[in-house]
Amino acid sequence: MSGRTGAWGASCSAPHLPPPLERHLPLSWYAPRRFERVRVVAWTCHEHRVTFYELCTAGGLAFIRRTFTEKGKPLVSHSDAWRHREAVGMWTGLLSGAVR
């Protein structure tokens, strides 16, 4: 990915999400699952955003992890878990504003 200029002029290599489309697919968010190992394979900007997202794999499945920072405290939630191909489709939708 190429660098991007953030709100404060700093270069950012992670994508910034566009606003959700008017008819976006809403994701359901749940308390984080406990996996022994989680691998983050893609992420959105966390330097310039209060909320950021990560595409994660664990236990043969993939899911989106959402982190929202409120008063300096991170609040983490997970989406449903899918097969990798379906999760990549949801991730692409997230990046385009079609999913949120």
Image (cartoon, rainbow, N blue to C red):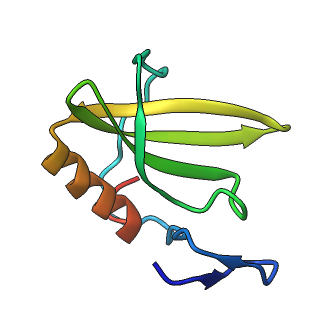
Residue 19 horizontal side relative to residue 85, left or right: right
Front residue of 65 and 98 = 65
- Position in image of residue 51 (x %, y %): 63, 50
Task: Identify the residue at image location x=57%, y=73%.
Answer: 13
Q: Relative to 14, is 75 above or below?
A: above
- Position of 100 with respect to 72 (left or right) is left
Q: Quadrant of residue 35?
A: top left
In which quarter of the view is residue 40 placed?
A: top left
Q: 55 above or below 14?
A: above
Observer able to see residue 57: yes
Give the residue at x 75% y 78%: 7
Q: Quadrant of the N terminus?
A: bottom left
Residue 37 at what x, y percent from top left?
41, 24
Residue 21 can be seen, yes or no: no
The x and y percentages for residue 10 are: 77, 79
Q: Position of residue 94 (x, y in %)?
A: 37, 59
What residue is rendered at 72% in x and 61% in y? 47
